[in-house]
Image: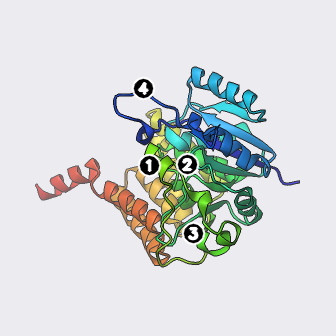
Amino acid sequence: MVRRVAFVLAGGKACRFQMPLQGWQDKCLALFEGKPFLVHAIENASCVVDEVIVCINDDAERRGIYLEVLEKHHLNARIVVDEKADVGGPMRAIFTGLRAVQADFCLTIPCDMPFVKPKIVGYLFSISEDFEVVMPMWPNGKLETLFMVLKRSIILEIVQTLCQLGRSHVDDIPRAAAKTLLLSPVKDLKTLDPELKSFININTLDDLKKLQPRNIQGPVKENIQLCQEGVITTNLQLMHKAAKMSQSDNFVGAQEKFDTCKKHFETYNNFFWTALACEGKGAFFDAANNYDNEAKIYEKNNCTRLLERALADKALCETHPINTKTDSVKKS
């Protein structure tokens, strides 16, 4: 039997939700229609999954408050505290959740999406069998980065490796996976949720007064599949080891492993992982070229957010201090 788990991401600082000159307010505990956001998120997912995990930061007081909320509302959910990692934010929470469960597929859901319909959750799971990542993408190419279904077995390896490499952006996950489905909300999901209210999230206090729907204008109306070969556990583990060796100042051993990974990923024209291996070797111009090739794939498919991320990585590699120093030597 396929086992499904939901991760409620509840460890954020909610900076945009705060009011000037007032004490910090936990957005997860903000009331909406008489119940905290945290309760809405758990209830919306619990009828579809086998277990709900609430991922929080390492605030002991916060954990105690959430336990009281769960007891008050008679909710069966488990709270896990972020593990130590080289990154923070949602990526760290997702890593923690993946490590905390034994499941086939895992849903990530932010605590500030109180309108998510269980039918939407069920549908995301129902089409995830042949994919490692199922993530909604709007017609303008923007992603629902924190509302997705992940195939735990391989994504745990991917996320662990990304964390070890210091990659904190969650949209690296669809870039890194072998098979990603970018699901168009205006296609199949609109029949399950005609107003697409499931995707409304609350960023500010003003959002509570006037709900902000997503932008449905843009060229992408169909689902998009992104597929790349060569993403296998052994090479991910080798990348992970190389990153650890580099952090321990074993640069020679690390570069040997990065080079082995680079050759493997190049064989499959896997531009994202090749770029990461190049960065590990200090070959930043080569990394920039690979990010550029990756960007062209996203540009062709109108994947605006992923295109922006790939181009940003390219720019960072092109302006890396090692490159600047090399250019200065060449000019002199």
Name which residue lies at 70% across and 39% down. Answer: 53
- Are the residues tagged 2 and 1 within 8 Å (C-beta)? yes
Give, as a three-letter code, the residue at label 4: Gly
Alpha-carbon span between mark 3 and mark 1:
19 Å
Residue labelled with disc 4: 23
Alpha-carbon span between mark 2 and mark 1:
9 Å
Residue 93 can be seen in this image: yes
Task: Say which mark, if any, is on residue 268.
Answer: 3
Give, as a three-letter code, the residue at label 3: Tyr
Quick one: label 2 or label 3, which is nearer the N terminus?
2
Secondary structure under tag 4 reads loop
Quick one: label 3 or label 1, which is nearer the N terminus?
3
Task: Say which mark, if any, is on residue 239.
Answer: 2
Name which residue lies at 59% across and 21% down. Answer: 60
Alpha-carbon span between mark 4 and mark 2:
43 Å
Which label lies toward us, 4 or 2? 4
Secondary structure under tag 3 reads loop
Residue labelled with disc 1: 280
